[in-house]
Image: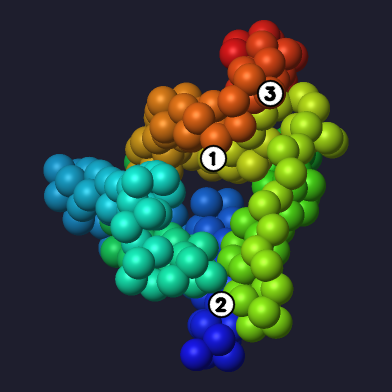
Amino acid sequence: MKAITFIYGIIAYFIFFATFLYAAGFMGNLLVPKDIDTGPETSMTSALIINALLLSVFAVQHSLMARPAFKEWWVKLVGKAGERSTYVLFSSLALILLFWKWQPIKSTIWEVENETLRLVLTGVFLVGLLVVLLSTFMINHFSLFGLKQVYQNMMNQKETEEPFTTRFFYAFVRHPIMLGFLIMLWAVPTMTLGHLFFSIGSTLYIFIAVKYLEEKDLRNMIGKKYEDYQKKVPMLIPFIGWK
């Protein structure tokens, strides 16, 4: 059973990583068969309704399964070692559904025609991608995505908690992973109406989920140390003092 859980965790991780890379291409219109502006257009009303539902499926799954009360119940079904891998897998499946069924709305909001500026914006987008990836390693990439848990379970090792980290990017912003995604959402040389809808919806979700859900959970888990951290380090935007 432990070997099966380990294999399950490995599979979930690689599905996640492929989905993460595809998400970058999807948002940045880069090197994927179906990006955010690819495909036949339907009516605007239909596209907006379908896209809103797709974003809602991901938002509900991503937030609900991350809450401590849900985890406590879910662990009874999937086991403690496989809980994180299951969360990662379901998040990936929700994103895959979004990529598959996303309805493009191709009306152009802005388009940067200067090739140098287009390259600069694409470079900023890739910096956002790098911020996301590096931020996961500044805590514990393999714990964040479930590999550490399934490995320790297979090796009969006691599961260890990750220490609270305020180093590197986390010294400047409390949620650098989300900051990286915000950069990726907006640093694009061509912004269509469909892309704008995706960027606005995702940005609102990030701000609401982080401020009203994740921050609350972190205060409950870490206590005064996190409250002190909140007072010193901005939540999402470095240097502007918004706590």
In the image: residue 156, left or right of residue 72:
right
Q: Please give the name of the residue rendered at 66% of the width and 11% of the height, measured from the top-left corner.
A: 231
238 vs 187: above or below:
above
Query: Mark 2 vs mark 1: which is more N-terminal?
Result: 2
Task: Answer whether labels 1 and 3 touch (C-beta < 8 Å).
Answer: no
28 vs 209: above or below:
below
Q: Distance between the residues labelled 1 and 3?
A: 31 Å
Q: How far apart are marks 2 and 1 (CA)?
A: 29 Å
Q: Identify residue for label 1.
A: 185
Q: Is mark 3 on a helix, strand or loop?
A: helix
Report the amino acid beneath label 1. Answer: Leu
Q: Nearer the viewer, residue 118 or 174?
A: 174
213 vs 59: above or below:
above
Q: Identify residue for label 2.
A: 9
Report the amino acid beneath label 2. Answer: Gly
| Res. 192 visible in picture | no
Foreground disc of the pair 2, 3:
3
Q: Please give the name of the residue rendered at 18% of the width and 46% of the height, measured from the top-left corner.
A: 49
Foreground disc of the pair 1, 3:
3
Numbered mark located on residue 225 in the image: 3
In the image: residue 49, left or right of residue 63:
left
Q: Please give the name of the residue rendered at 50% of the width and 90% of the height, measured from the top-left corner.
A: 1
In the image: residue 6, left or right of residue 167:
left
Q: Position of residue 118 (x, y in %)?
A: 69, 41
Q: How far apart are marks 2 and 3 (CA)?
A: 32 Å
